[in-house]
Amino acid sequence: MFKLYDNVIIKDKHISGTIIDIIETQKGLVFTVESNDKGKWEDGYGGIYPLFDCSETEIERMIKTAQ
């Protein structure tokens, strides 16, 4: 299960980002992910850091590595 502010990767786009909103719909949960990188994406929306609406199956949690 994902929660707000989890760091995730949008699998099919290879974009890392942060979950900034979670909405429950009739079709299931929708996670709004804000990209960590600036730039425009055809299917992204918002400002400098694009936003993407994703289902739970489209994202995966980023694994932190020890430094």
Image (cartoon, helix red, strand yellow):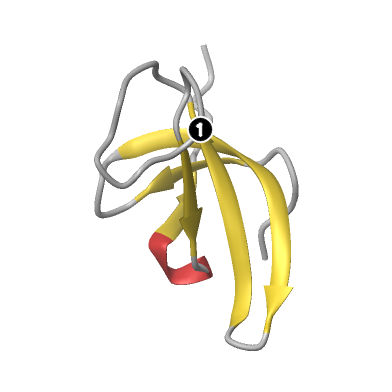
Identified by mark 1, the residue type is: Gly
Give the quadrant of the N terminus. bottom right
In the image, residue 51 sits, relative to residue 10, either above or below, namely above
In the image, residue 9 sits, relative to residue 28, either above or below, namely above
Q: Position of residue 41 (x, y in %)?
A: 28, 34
In the image, residue 67 sits, relative to residue 21, either above or below, namely above
Residue for point 31% across, 47% down: 43
Location of mark 1 (residue): 46
Quadrant assignment, res 7: top right
Residues 48 and 6: in front is: 48
Specify the farthest residue to the top: 67
Quadrant assignment, res 34: top right
Residue for point 68% across, 79% down: 25
Residues 49 and 4: in front is: 49
Q: Secondary structure at mark 1?
A: loop
Residues 30 and 3: in front is: 30
Residues 47 and 23: in front is: 47
Structural crowding at the residue carrying mark 1, measured as other residues with C-alpha within 10 Å and reported as few (<14), some (14–19) or many (≥20): few
**Relative horizontal placement of residue 64, taking residue 29 as reference (left or right):** left
Specify the farthest residue to the bottom: 26
In the image, residue 35 sits, relative to residue 57, either above or below, namely above
Q: Position of residue 48 (x, y in %)?
A: 46, 17
Report how many numbered discs are placed on residues in the image: 1
Q: Position of residue 53 (x, y in %)?
A: 50, 55
Residue for point 71% across, 49% down: 21
